[in-house]
Amino acid sequence: MDGVKNKKVISGMILGEDSPDTVITNGTIFNVFTREFIDQQSIWIEDGVITYIGPYHDFPKKEDMLVIDAHDMVLLPGLIDGHTHLSRSGIEEYIRYVIPSGVTTVVMEAIEFGTIAGKEGIEYFVRGLKDQPIRFYYTLPPLCGLTPSEEINAPLNEEVLHLLKDPKCLGVGEIYWGNIFLEGQQGERVRELASLALSLGKQVEGHTAGATGRKLQAYTCFGASSDHEPITEDEVMERLRLGYWVMIREGAIRKELSGVKGIFQEKIDFRRLILSTDGVDPEGFLEEGYLDASLKRMMELRVPPGLAYQMVTINVAEHFHLDHLIGSLSIGKIADIVIIPSHKEFSPQLVMCNGKIIFKDGRAMVEPQKVTFPDHMFNTVRIPGLAFPQIPRQGKARVIEFVTRLVTKEKIIDLSAPEEIQDVIMVMAIDRLGSGKAFTGFLKGFGLQRGSYGTTMAWDT
């Protein structure tokens, strides 16, 4: 519902001239603007849009009207995951497990599809996100590597301009800060892509792991407005002071809430803080959940519930300039609604997206649309044959040592010293396109005791 004519419909409904399709009564509404929980409220919905919100319960009745008694439970806006990846599950299965979490809008990175199948892969991925029971937006991956050989599938900027202009595309996906400073055509392409996004009124999503001080500020001048990499309170604060929207990750890649929890004790404005998953793996879906699990973790850390709910609703919507549509329970906004037992107990009892019930009484009420990809996008790993290189037993070697799950450092070890080669394994990065080329090196601290491990997960750096 949009336009002046439909605003007349909404105003007439508020004044009692017409009846809504759906009414939710006796609810406690969370107001994202004031961080209040206001009891004894009603919400009227017409054609998927909120047409009234307030204490007036004497609504005009009509045949086939759906009336939901909230029984004093809490009504929140549908949750928004502002940064996630789909590298661990298919689109359909992802939707099935996200719906019970209360998430009604997802901003999806498309790196994995572009890295493997280029522009065509991104286009098919975007096609699969359309007409689903929850709402999807996406960001255009920059597909930038640290060397030219890593950018074999990166399209020219003019080839993806139509994607960047797509209303569902919110900007350029995470650009690693080191790539923005690269010399030659690599750096020029990425800087031009960022500039192009900004000229279209879109976002440039940041990736600033390892950057601080003047390096961070130099990167910021190219237009990055968000960052999901801070892992300490100091890193969060530095980026907030530079005007970033800071996304705290709590998902499969990293769980940062414990490391940054001190930030919630600071006397600062939190409206630029966002909670996101950065991706959840199948095990996480089964054992913990999705963004609902992240919210429960915030409750365990005694973060005020109102602040936690702002971080997954209005804050995300404002960052992506979507707050005229979603992120709040207010007049004229899309009726994305989550009903939970109390403000401290995030356990969705009912979920609405676009005014339609998609989850109720512990089960999904809708099924995802079938998603297909062309045959040539399957079986893309073409390896000429198997090789079994042996680890040398003497001399010195450079080793990649794990500091954390995502942070590594260089280490020089003596291969003839038993105490130094403990937990050292061989690693190969193989060209999936069948050239026969591979990088061979050593890892320390990975933790593999026997057997081997392989993955086709492909990130741009």
Image: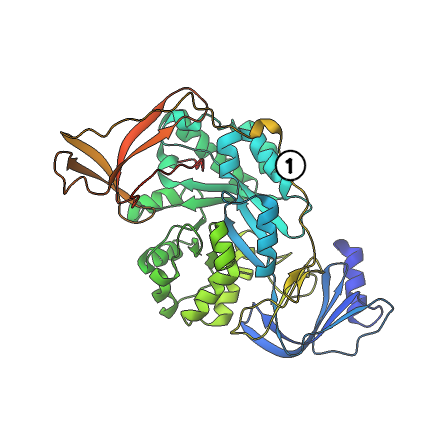
Pick the residue in front: 241 or 51. Answer: 51
Q: Which secondary structure, mark 1?
A: loop
Name the residue furthest front: 450
* Along the viewing direction, whichever of 299 and 171 lies nearer the viewer: 299
Q: From the image, tell me which residue sits under label 1.
A: 372
Residue 79 located left or right of residue 456: right
On the picture, is 174 further left or further right than 132? left
Which residue is most to the right?
63
Residue 267 visible, this angle: no
**Can residue 326 be seen?**
yes
Establish if 185 lies above or below 4: above
- Viewer-nearest residue: 335 or 95: 95
Which part of the image, by quadrant, shows the C terminus? top left
Q: Residue at x 19, y 28 (%)?
A: 392
Image check: 80 left or right of 432? Answer: right
Residue 280 to residue 156: above or below: below
Residue at left offset 48%, top offset 68%: 307
Q: Amino acid at mark 1?
A: Thr
Residue 214, position in %: x, y?
30, 46
In which image quadrant can residue 366 be found?
A: bottom right
Question: Residue 164: where, in percent of width, then height?
Answer: 58, 37
Q: Position of residue 132 (x, y in %)?
A: 67, 48
Q: Quadrant of the N terminus?
A: bottom right
